[in-house]
Image: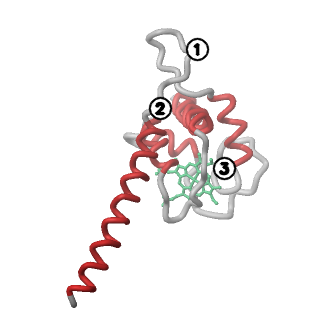
Amino acid sequence: MSDDDVAKAQKIAATQLSRAGVRLAYILNDVLAPIPSGAAPGVKTIGNSAAGRVFALATCSACHVVAQDQKAPRDLTTAPDFQAIANSRGMTQVAMRTFLASPHPTMPNLRLSPQQSMDVTAFIVSLKKATR
Ligand code: HEC
């Protein structure tokens, strides 16, 4: 490698690193966004699960079993059903919102607004209680 190539590579690496920084900042902003006002003090209500259910039926049901009564086909992919996601170990709203804000190898990079992300994760987490 010539000095020229090294200099070029260093420039590219610096650009890529700053892009990664911006991306990480975006994810952190989204994940750590303040809980919308309206929740009673001390109540950890993040997102509206009823709105999340409607959104998920419209947006996620092509691949996931979102609700047992959904009409959408379920055989397109091997996406896990939402109840299974809710019951998987260590699955929290923060973990889920991080997942939804990050690129993913098999799931299209869905662009959810912070509100949609909160609502849909509130809905998925609500399914956890349904099995107990
Ligand atoms: C085009 C198909 C498709 C759509 C649409 C889709 N997903 Fe997925 N999703 C997948 C697949 C496939 C996986 C499994 C990826 C893997 O495990 O590698 C997955 C995984 C996930 C996971 C992670 C599960 C885990 O245990 O790690 C979450 C959470 C999730 N999807 C939520 C959603 C939400 C919310 C929506 C709608 C806003 C959505 N998905 C829309 C295909 C889809």
Give the residue type that dot 3 points to.
Answer: Cys
Tell whether 38 sits left or right of 31: right
Residue at figure coordinates x 61%, y 41% from the top left? 113
**Whether the residue under disc 1 has CB within 8 Å of ligand 1:** no
Q: Report the residue marked by disc 2.
A: 33
**Whether the residue under disc 3 has CB within 8 Å of ligand 1:** yes
Q: Report the residue marked by disc 1.
A: 38
- Sequence-first disc among 1 and 3: 1
Instruction: Find residue 55 and report its horizontal and vertical position in percent.
Output: 70, 40
Q: Nearer the viewer, residue 42 or 129?
A: 42
- Closest to the camera, between mark 3 and mark 2, is 2
Q: Nearer the viewer, residue 106 or 89?
A: 106
Instruction: Find residue 29 and report its horizontal and vertical position in percent.
Output: 44, 39
Residue 79, labelled with which disc?
none
Q: Residue furthest right?
A: 71
Residue 60, labelled with which disc?
3
Instruction: Find residue 131 and report its horizontal and vertical position in percent.
Output: 54, 32
Tell whether 121 sits left or right of 57: left
